[in-house]
Amino acid sequence: MRNKPNGINIQLTPSQFDYLYEVIMFAYEMDVPEQKGWDMQTYDNMVDNVCNAKTTILSETVRGI
């Protein structure tokens, strides 16, 4: 049986998520990934993951609530 890779789970308020989305899309539009030499497939996958985010109940440790 193969081990699944680790990931990172972050908690954001809806406003924080909107900011993150805007920053990621702005960087995409400004060709930041190419300028930084980042792997475009990895960046595209990250954009897809952000776009597919789901709502959750936030824990008490989240700042900005």
Image (tube, rainbow, N blue to C red):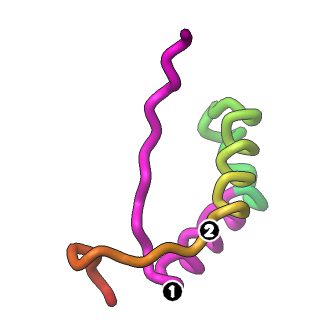
Task: Please rate how many residues cluster around mark 1, counting C-alpha atoms within 10 Å: few if below 14, some from 14 to 19, many from 20.
Answer: few
| Mark toward the start of the polypeptide (1 vs 2) | 1
Callout in the foreground (1, 2): 2
Q: Which residue lies most toward the front here? A: 1
Amino acid type, label 2: Lys
Residue 64, percent from left and from top: 31, 86
Mark 1 is on which residue type? Ser
What numbered label is drawn on residue 15? 1
* 14 magenta-colored: yes
Marks 1 and 2, how far apart at CA: 14 Å
In-image side of 3 versus 39 (left or right)? left
- Residue drawn at the location 62% of the way across and 68% of the way down: 54
- What quarter of the picture does the N terminus occupy? top right
Determine which quarter of the picture holds residue 42.
top right
- The residue singled out by tag 2 in the image is 54
Badge number at residue 35: none
Q: Is residue 52 magenta?
A: no
Tell me what residue is drawn at x 74 percent, y 50 percent: 31
Point out residue 45 in the picture as x, y percentages from the top left corner: 72, 42
Residue at 67 percent of width and 52 percent of height = 49
